[in-house]
Image (cartoon, rainbow, N blue to C red):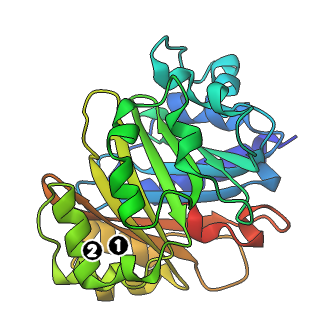
Amino acid sequence: MARTGELEALYAAMEESAELLGIAPSREKVLPILEAYQDDLAKLVVAFRVTTRGAEDLDCRFTALPGDVNPYLDAVHKGITPATDHPVGSLLADLEDKMPFLAHGIDFGVVGGFKKTWTFLPMTDLQNLATLIDTPSMPKSLAENIDFYKRYGLDDKLSMIGVDYPSRTVNIYFLGAPAECREPETVRAMLKDLGLPEPSERMLEMAQRAAGIYTTLSWDSPNIHRITFATMVPDFRQLPDELDVAPEIEKFARNVGYTYDATGKGLYNAAGYSGGEYFKLQTYYQLAPGTVEAKGLLGSAA
């Protein structure tokens, strides 16, 4: 169990990271979440994430939670998020007997509180989308877009599922996509197929280095809302040199702290959506030895 001093130290790190972005965190929202996971904190990977679409919140991510515990129902039980009768609340429960869950993660904002769950599948046992399509609580838009996934060789590369409870959206992640999925001509074709704007040269360049690809779906639309290309970087402090970002995000990237003895690892994601494109920056504050993340899933936790 984490001591009070350890919880306060982690909260202080989150507070300092948020202040780099000009964000004032809510202690009333964050401390109950830290207390809810205090028994596992030393074993977890802790990451911070911000987007270039406007830094109104700093998202914090805990990953490598046990795979045999439903993270949403657990969060409801811990009292850090309300229960819902929307299908978003049933999705993980409907899937847990259908596919191998290796580990989970959660996201929460320092302002908005609990937001998301992440469910990792074994990298050696990537799943077929057919399993998801047959799930009653899955958005129908997945089945309606199955030809898109098959066209680009993604339909049997399912590696992770992200569920956003306030937004009622689902992220479907793919690893091991065909190499051509990262080439400029194919990236342009993918966005065109989805009815999304033409990608910029920067997005095309970033997509060529992507380790993973994911799409975002909802229960309210037949369309794929967003496609994102995720890239692991060895030192997140170099990202401002590659991206034209707002001053507060540059300040965050160059100054955010981390506890492990190595160069600061990070992820950056290029996302295309109906309004154009934006980028996401994720930095790792804590990498616990022996966890799922430390064994090679860092690049999929996008």
For label 2, the SS is helix
Q: Amino acid at mark 2?
A: Val
Quadrant position of residue 70: top right
Q: Is residue 246 above or below residue 86?
A: below
Please name the residue shown 16% across and 77% down the image. 200
Q: Earlier in the sequence, mark 1 or mark 2?
A: 2
- Which residue was labeled with disc 1? 251
Q: Quarter holding the N terminus?
A: top right
Please name the residue shown 41% across and 74% down the image. 253
Count of marks overlaid on the render: 2
Say which of 230 and 195 sits in front: 195
For label 1, the SS is helix
**Drawn side of residue 216 relative to residue 116, left or right:** left
- Indicate which disc residue 187 carries: 2
Please name the residue shown 66% across and 25% down the image. 93
Q: Is residue 199 above or below residue 201?
A: above
Q: CA distance from mark 1 to mark 2?
A: 31 Å
